[in-house]
Image: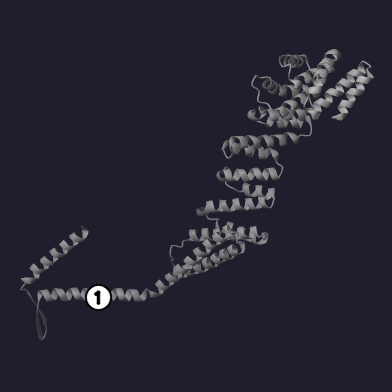
Amino acid sequence: MRAALWFLALFGVAVAVALFAGNNQAVVTIFWPPNRIDISFNLLVLLLAGLFLLLYLALRASAAVFSLPAEAKRWRAQQKERAMYGALMDAVANLLAGRYIRSGKAAQNALAQENSLGLMVDQAGHGHGHSASQAGQLRSLAHLLAAESAQALQNKALRDQHLQLALRSSAQRHAQELREGVQFRAARWALEDRDAGAALEWLGQLPQGAARRTLALRMKLRAARLAQQTRQALETARLLAKHRAFSPSAAQSIVRGLALELLNDAHDPAQLQQAWFSLDDNERAMPELVVHAASRLMALNGDAAMARAWLLPVWERMMAPNSDLGDNLRIKLISVLEAGLESLDAAWLARIEAAQLSRPRDTTLQYLAGMACLHRQLWGKARQLLTQVAPALQDKTLHRNAWRALALLAEQREDEAAAAQAYKQAALL
């Protein structure tokens, strides 16, 4: 359709010219003393048009001739720029392929091409799309690739040299993201070298917004755990769980593990209480942490009443109809309660007796009730309960303690045969 319209316009112009020129009898007289020249008006128009075309072509030809040096420089700059980007892509490809020596050489080649291109741009005053910001970003990327290759080859001196050059090239405001990337890579290299202090130092240099990113928090968690800074690692794990960087089960497992390490780092009851109250409500509600904290408190000769107060929610959860506590956790809970039976109050004694009566087939509850009666000097009831439960206990520690308690009861009533038999059973375990 467009071609047809062009043909129609061309035919219209031809018709107009034919109508104008065909009947035009005008004559133009040019006086050049002593001569007189008479030409038709149509010929004059053609001569003027030809002269204009000739001048236009002459000007274009002269401009093309005078611009040849600039065009040659531009073409050379374009070729160098293509070679530079090609070398940069070769460096990336070789790095991904594990050819670190080739990658480093390609990055060095890209830097050499960029330097020569920068000189040509400065001399010519312009370049083929090669601005100062692009030059800085390309230098930073090339230095970063060279540093990455040096890190893979364990050439730390060369790595640090290119790292500093990459930071210097990305110092402009428009290269903030690239500078943050360089700092992230430096922190990761420090983690690979197991230098937790250097990794935390690099992460501390990040801007506030970049320091909250998931990548930064993951690195901070690794560095804090490597530096055995359990409290900082726990705070970082909480942030990662809040940002949903892990699945709920994985996040809970990580937080629980760090909380256990924090509790294990306490060396006296005061430190343990401080560590315990530094946990949040969700963490203090985890049965594993509660039982472990109470166990650590008893191991550090802390307040048994406080340990039982911590254990009360777990005890109620264990006594619920559909309890989800595992057998190992139940046995550990019983062991912690057993360690504080000497200072057991009436309320807890009533809870233990009520639990044993409500679940007569639960061997661990019957064992705990028997040991509680033993510490209360209720010899007959203690002997009855422990005699029934001793052969049925599955846990070796509880089984051995039950036989030892029976041996003590036998010695108390001066039954040497029964005591010897009980000690024998305990020794076999």
Q: Residues within 10 Å of mark 1 (few under 14, many from 20)?
A: few
Residue at 69% from the left image edge and 43% from the top image edge: 225
Q: Residue at x 68, y 31 (%)?
A: 278
- Give the labeled residue for mark 1: 55
Residue 47, placed above or below residue 35: above
Amino acid at pointer 1: Leu
Quadrant (top left, top right, bottom left, bottom right) of the N terminus = bottom left
Residue placed at 60% from the left, 50% from the top? 184
Provide residue 374's location: percent of width, then percent of height.
84, 17
Who is closer to the viewer here, 278 or 349? 349
Say left or right for 257 vs 414: left
Residue 263, relative to residue 192: is it above or below? above
The front one of 76 and 54 is 76
Q: Examine the image and state in which quarter residue 213 appears.
A: top right
Give residue 228's quadrant in the image: top right
Residue 380 found in image quarter: top right
Q: Helix, strand or loop at disc 1? A: helix
- Residue at (89, 26) in percent of width and height: 424
Q: Nearer the viewer, residue 28 or 428?
A: 428
Colouring chosen for the image of the structure: one colour
Residue 158 rendering spot, x and y as whole percentages: 65, 62
The spot of residue 30 in percent (x, y) is 11, 79
